[in-house]
Amino acid sequence: MISVGIDIGSYSIKVTEVESFSNSYRINDYSEILIGEDPSQDKRLLMVDALRRVAIHYQNRPVRFVLGLSQDRVASRLKTFPFREKGKINKSLPYQLSDEVPFDPQSAIYDAHFIGIRGRFTDTLSFITPIENAKEMIDIVRDAGIDPDVLTSVGSSSANFFSDWAGGIEDLNEPLTPGDLGGPEEHVTRNARVLLNIGHTRTTLSTYIDGHLVAVRSLFFGGLNIAKNISSKYEIPEVEALKNLIERGFILATEDGATKDQIFFSNTISESLRGLTQPLKRVLLSLSTELSVQFEEIVLSGGVGNLMNLGPFLTQELEVPCNPFWFLRGVANSRVDYTDPQALSGLTSLGLALDGLRRPRNPAINFRKDSLALQSESLESFWAAYKNTFAIVACAIFALFVYGYLKSSFAESLAERGQEALVEQAKSPGLNIARPTSIGIKSFIKQKKAEIQAKKAISELSSVNSAMDILADISRKFPSNEQVRSDVRRFSVTGDTVRIDVEASDRRSFNFIQNSISNLAVGGKVSQERSSVNPSAGRTATTFVFRVPRKE
């Protein structure tokens, strides 16, 4: 199965194609289509145009398309349920979360990411989004000719890098976080890792305990904030500032040996990053208290993750080790030779593609349900396209039933009238017999039957190919003397069996003749037998035997 993950960002669209093999996968392709930051262009039209190229590339190919909603459009809550059935959990989500999220259950879509099972308890990270958000995303890609199979959350898709996406729901020995149902009153502080994806306009923070996704947060900060600060300090257009950030952005680890321009440029970027580190500290402190964890590492991804010396800068600011997340360098089965920037910016689209390979026993988050379900939408569009056809077919079926009834009625009427005519004819047969007797009548009937059979035989003979017709067909197919030096010594047709005695100088000539006339034979079968004809000196003879259709 092939899955295509499409990460629709505000600056570019990343597309990753993966193919599943048992419990592994292979990365087949990766591409990035720039949207840009030109304020004079309609960004939605640019997105649709870029996605249309993706749709054309995968036209008529059996693939699963997976899209992700940005985390600022999705809410998440950690929930424990006192039962294990997935269906019951999904049905109870709107009621369990009604007091925690400001959404009307009728206007929102709920789904659960299953963390693990502890006895009769199930730990989940539930995701909620308003229907309008999901519908807006689906409408954009549909305008480009793509109907996504899975609409998930960008934050939840990153779980594929830390857990076994191909396996089932894991059995847990103890609760991961304090306050979980069925857990002890005292909870030990545990280590946690954070995946920090810094994009163009937003940053997504995903927290993991023992490889399990337990929290997702979104911050309104991205590379555009840094570009705006560069634009302001250097008084240049934002587009040019963004280009400088992507191509030459850096943070000085030390100012020793650096020029004033380098120091000023580095300080400009560092100053911009304070807009990320300050709210990030508050989020980390909140998560540390809420989940009873201490952070052992923060791994960086996204386009801004490629910024030189960003890891050391964040390590100093957050007092937590921060390093780029080189997950793609560890993928053994890949046809894509990623550059360093691609290895970080392409992670989200890979996570989305892996969501498309998940199995029903541990499915991905999918907001295509209820009114946005893939099946119902497809049936609705199918009905809209073919309802007129169905109306015509229904009318034709009704007309067929009426015709069948009338035909049956007419047939019965004709049968009755025919029977009456036969009875009348039987009363006065009109035979050319002076004194009709039973023997004479039987003889007369026998004579007429013989005449009918004779006429039938003559009619059948008229549709039978004559021996001359068969000879003409064979002559057209038989190779010329320029192709094969051969002579036909005898030709006979018995019923549907044709026998041709041919002499030639070598066996290769016989094979060539056999291939030439095989199209005339029934089933293309032509056999060679020993010939009774005495061949000329230096030649050999063989008999070709095959069957031909006599009737046209």
Image (spheres, helix red, strand yellow):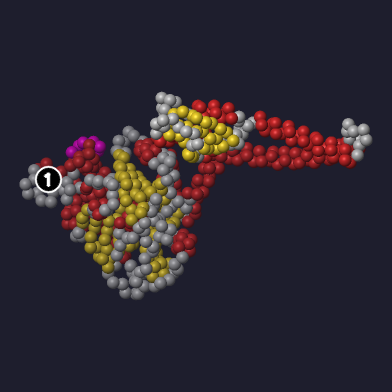
Residue 163 pos. (x, y %)? 32, 60
Would residue 72 be seen by someone viewing this image from the given angle?
no
Q: Nearer the viewer, residue 55 or 315?
A: 55
Q: Relative to 124, is 475 above or below?
A: above
Q: Relative to 502, is 2 above or below?
A: below
Q: Nearer the viewer, residue 349 or 29?
A: 29
Is the residue marked by circle 1 packed among few (<14), some (14-19), or many (20+) residues within 10 Å? some
Question: Label 1: which residue?
Answer: 263
Would residue 379 be seen by someone viewing this image from the given angle?
yes
* Most distant residue in the left direction: 257
Residue 405: image quadrant is top right
* Most distant residue in the bottom direction: 185
Residue 445 pos. (x, y %)? 82, 37
Judge whether residue 472 is colored magenta. Answer: no
Judge whether residue 236 is colored magenta. Answer: yes
| Residue appearing at x 44%, y 30% in the figure | 536
Q: State left or right for residue 418 relative to residue 299.
A: right
Q: State left or right for residue 393 relative to residue 37.
A: right
| Secondary-structure class at tag 1 | helix
* Most distant residue in the right direction: 435
Query: What range is drawn magenta here?
Result: 234-239
